[in-house]
Amino acid sequence: MDKDNPRLDVDPETMRAMGHAMVDMVVDHWSHMHRRPAAVTRDAASLRAILREPLPEAPGDWQETLAMAREHIFESMGQIAHPRFLAFVPGPSNAVAALGDILTTGYNTAASLWRETPGPVEMELAVLEWLRELVGLDPACEGIFTSGGSVANLTGIAAGRTAILGEDMAGAVAYCASQTHSSVARGFRILGFARSQLRAIAVDAAFRIDLAALEAAIAADRAAGLRPFCIVANAGTTNTGAVDPMDALADIAAREGMWLHVDGAYGGAAALVPAGRALLGGMARADSVTIDPHKWLFQPYEAGVSFVRHPGLLERTFASNPEYLQDVAGSMLEVNPADRGIQLSRGARAFKMWLSLKLLGARAFRAAVQQGIDNGEMAEDLLRRSGRFEIVTPATLAVITFRFVRPGFDGAAADRLHRRIVDALLADGYAFVTSTELGGRTCLRFCTINPRTTQEDLAGTIDRITAFGDAVPAGDAP
Ligand SMILES: Cc1ncc(COP(=O)(O)O)c(C=O)c1O
C-alpha cells in the first residue's frame, strides 16, 4: 500500500501476495486446529483497547495488519469448527467450502436476478434440488438460500401466512412445543403477530410436543372464535435433539386446514442417513421446512435454506416487482431468487455447497452425518461408564444432556456446580462446552455433529469436567 498515494485498488502482485498469505493462514488454521484450544477467553477491556482504534485515514501495512487480525480477531474466538467445540450447535464447516467462499467473494457474485447473473442463480437452483433429494423432500418443494435458520424459519412462516391467512392476521393462532427454538417466536413477532398469537404447548417426558395438549388448545381456540392456522414442528430441538411426532402433526394440520412448518435447522440434516430419516419420518409432508447447511451440512457461515412445498407460493409471498426491475422480471424458467425471500441484493451462498458436493461427493456428507450420530452415542457410553454422571436425555440426533453427580451438591448447589464447571472449561480452553436448563435444573450438554471429533476428544473433555467438578470447594454446597 502506497502511503503517499492513497487509492482503493492494489496492484496485481500485491493482491497475489496478500491472497497467498491469507490462504496460508487458513490452511495453517485447518491443519493445526485439533492441537489448538477450542475455547478462548479474552479480557474485554484489553481487547477493546487494541481493536477500537481511531479510524485509519492512511493506508496500513498489510503484513502487520494480517498478523493483528490473526491474533486479535481470528484467534480471539472459540473455534466453532473445532473437534472439541461441543457447545450450542457447532459449525463444523469444511475446507473446500471455505475456499469456495474466496471465489464467491472474489468475483463479487450475486444470485438475485436470473438475467443479471444466470450462472449463479441456476447453480443455486441445482444445489436446492440436490439438497431436497439428500433430505428426501417432496419434488414439488421450491427453496431459497438464506443467512441461516432464523431467516429460513421466518421465510417458511411468512409463506404459511400467505397461504392460510392472506392479508388478515386478526384472531390467527399458531402452535409450537415449549422447547422450540427462540427464532420461531421472533419470526412470528417480526411478521407482526402479537406474542399471544403463538401458543407454547407443553412437552412430554421426552421433550416432544404433547399431542393431546396441542389438540385441546386448537379446539379451545376454535371454540373461542379464533383461527388456528399454523403448527411449527421440531426436527431436532436445540436443547435435547427431541423430534416432534411429524406424522401425527401432519395429520392434525391436514384435518384442521393448517400450515405445518418444520424447523429442521440443526436436525433436518439427519435425514441424510437411514437412522435419522426413520426418526424424522413425516418431515416430507410439511408445507415448509428449514434446513441449515451452516450447521450439520458442514458449510461455513452463512447458509440456511427454506423449502416450501407449494410451487409459486414463495413468489406470491415475497415478489414486489418495482419499475426499476422491469427489465429483469422472472419467468417459469428464469427464476429470480430475489422474488423468493426478504433480500434483493444477495450473495451466492449456495456456491460453497455446490463446490463441496462436487469435490467431496454426497457419500462423504452422509458418512459425516452418521459420524455425528455415532459420536453422541459414544459420548453417552463414556459418561455412563465413568459412573460420575446422570444422563438427563440420552443421545438423540447427536445431542446428549447430563449432570455431574457430586454427593452434597443438590438442587441450587448442583446448578451452581455445573456453571462453575462451564467457567472452568472455558478458562482451560481444551473443549468448549455449555449448559442448558431442563425441567428447571441446570445440566451440561454436548452437541457432537462435528465428524472430526474423536473418542480421545470426548474422553479428554469428560475427564476435565470430572476434575473441575471435583475441584469446586465442598463449602460451595449449602
Ligand atoms: C432448532 C434451531 N432452529 C433455529 C436455529 C437458528 O438458526 P441460525 O442460528 O442459523 O439463525 C437454531 C440455531 O441453533 C436451531 O438449533
Image (cartoon, rainbow, N blue to C red):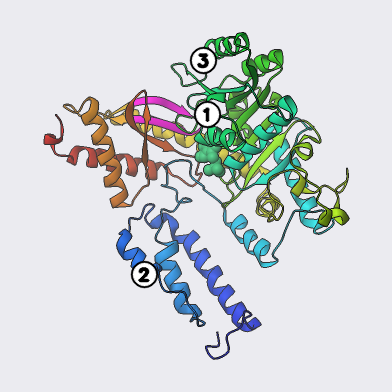
Q: Residue at x 76, y 41 (%)?
A: 129
> Which mark identifies residue 195?
1
Secondary structure of the residue carrying tag 3 is loop
Q: Residue at x 38, y 41 (%)?
A: 458
The reply to whether residue 370 is visible in this rendering is no
**Residue 67 percent across, percent down from the top left:** 44, 73
Which one is nearer the viewer's eye here, 429 or 359?
Answer: 429
Residue range in magenta is: 391-402
Q: Residue at x 44, y 78 (%)?
A: 64
Q: Quadrant of the N terminus?
A: bottom right
| Measured Cα–Cα span from mark 1 to mark 3 | 21 Å
Density class for disc 2 (Cα within 10 Å; few <14, some 14-19, many ≥20) is few
> Which mark identifies residue 210?
3
Q: Amino acid at mark 3?
A: Asp
The reply to whether residue 307 is visible in this rendering is yes
**Residue 22 percent across, percent down from the top left:** 54, 70
Q: Is mark 3 within 8 Å of ligand 1?
A: no
